[in-house]
Image (spheres, rainbow, N blue to C red):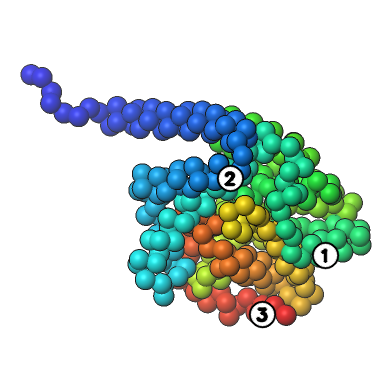
Amino acid sequence: MISMGHGSPADASSRRRFLKQWQRETGIRFVTGLSRVMGSLPYALVLPGCAGLGLLGCVLCARDRRRVLRNLARAFPQAGRRARVELAGQVFVGMALNAMDGMRFLHRPVAELESLVDVRGGEYLMQAVESGRGAIVVTGHLGPWELFAAYFARFFPLSVVARPAKDARLEELLSRLRARFGVRVVREGDGRALVQLLKAGGLVGILCDQARKSEGTWVPFFGRPAWWPVGPAKLARLTGAALIVGGIRRVGWRRLEIVLRPPLDLGRAGAGPAGIQATTAEIARDLEGLVRESPSQWIWMYDPWRGAPVAAAETPARCGAGARG
């Protein structure tokens, strides 16, 4: 008798792996080729095409679109469904434009970046450098975040904490981009190297909004408990480095703006685990403020609220961190 079934579970799993591998291969080839094209064209021609790709991605990537909408509903429960759908489209456009900004600089002169960027709060970083304390600059996946580090590496020795990309070719592209601007990489988990850099007065950049596997704590983020790494707070206390939250974002079509918040007051947060918790809550609050100012430019597909225990709802009261002055 001929079987009319759909194949074994092993066959289905093999097909899923093949499809995933094909999607990854296609994506890497597309990104590599597109970066060359975008690097050779004028900025004004590249922008509309990338915006169109972002809108196409919003239509085609249904699973990611649903994830973005779910997280937008958590962060902005007062907004109507129509407003969140519109914002979701802007998020996909923002992701395409931000990716384009990074990829273009694989082939554009590095000096061109300085002409595109305005900086607010740069004096806070200058004060940290001139004092010899070193600084930890904490940011998130906001705007073209690779260019956030790239901009400052043009003026100061700067290292970023990063884990290797899952695909070796994507890692090679990121390594090339960072090397062009002189950004050094410290692999995640190499605490000794970070301590040495900071005690020598260096600058360290840390992405802190996608750190599910890192040591962390539950702190308020958009009014809900979210998992946040405690590493930046611990490093600052151990080394005496300034702890600054900042980000980069698009302003209009053709300008980028870097915003740095005033350094966190570690003394006010207190000592011990409670102080670490309070400082981490302040980091989350400062980054939330930047995201609220430019919500279309944060990657809303990641869910920092996932898995929050019921007891964590009391986190704001336990943190004891007052409003920033």
Tell me the SS state at disc 2.
helix
Q: Would residue 12 be found to the left or right of residue 95 on screen?
A: left
Q: Which residue is pictured at 43% across the width and 32% down the height?
A: 23
Tell me the SS state at disc 3.
loop
Can see residue 199? Answer: no
Dots 3 and 2: beta carbons under 8 Å?
no
Whichever of callouts 3 and 2 sits on the residue coming sooner in the sequence is 2
Total number of numbered discs in the rendering: 3
Instruction: Check disc 3 and give the amino acid type.
Output: Ala
Dots 1 and 2: beta carbons under 8 Å?
no
Q: CA distance from mark 1 to mark 2?
A: 32 Å
Whichever of callouts 3 and 1 sits on the residue coming sooner in the sequence is 1
Instruction: Check disc 2 and give the amino acid type.
Output: Ala
Q: CA distance from mark 3 to mark 2?
A: 41 Å
Quarter where residue 129 is shown: bottom right
Nearer mark to the viewer, of 3 and 1? 1
Position of the N terminus by quadrant: top left
Q: Residues within 10 Å of mark 1 (few under 14, many from 20)?
A: few
Q: Which residue is mark 3?
A: 323
Q: Position of residue 85 (x, y in %)?
A: 38, 61
Q: Which residue is pictured at 38% across the width and 27% down the height?
A: 18
Tell me the SS state at disc 1.
helix
Q: Which mark is residue 44?
A: 2
Q: Residues within 10 Å of mark 2 (few under 14, many from 20)?
A: few
Q: Which residue is mark 1?
A: 123
Q: Which mark is residue 256?
A: none
Instruction: Check disc 1 and give the amino acid type.
Output: Glu
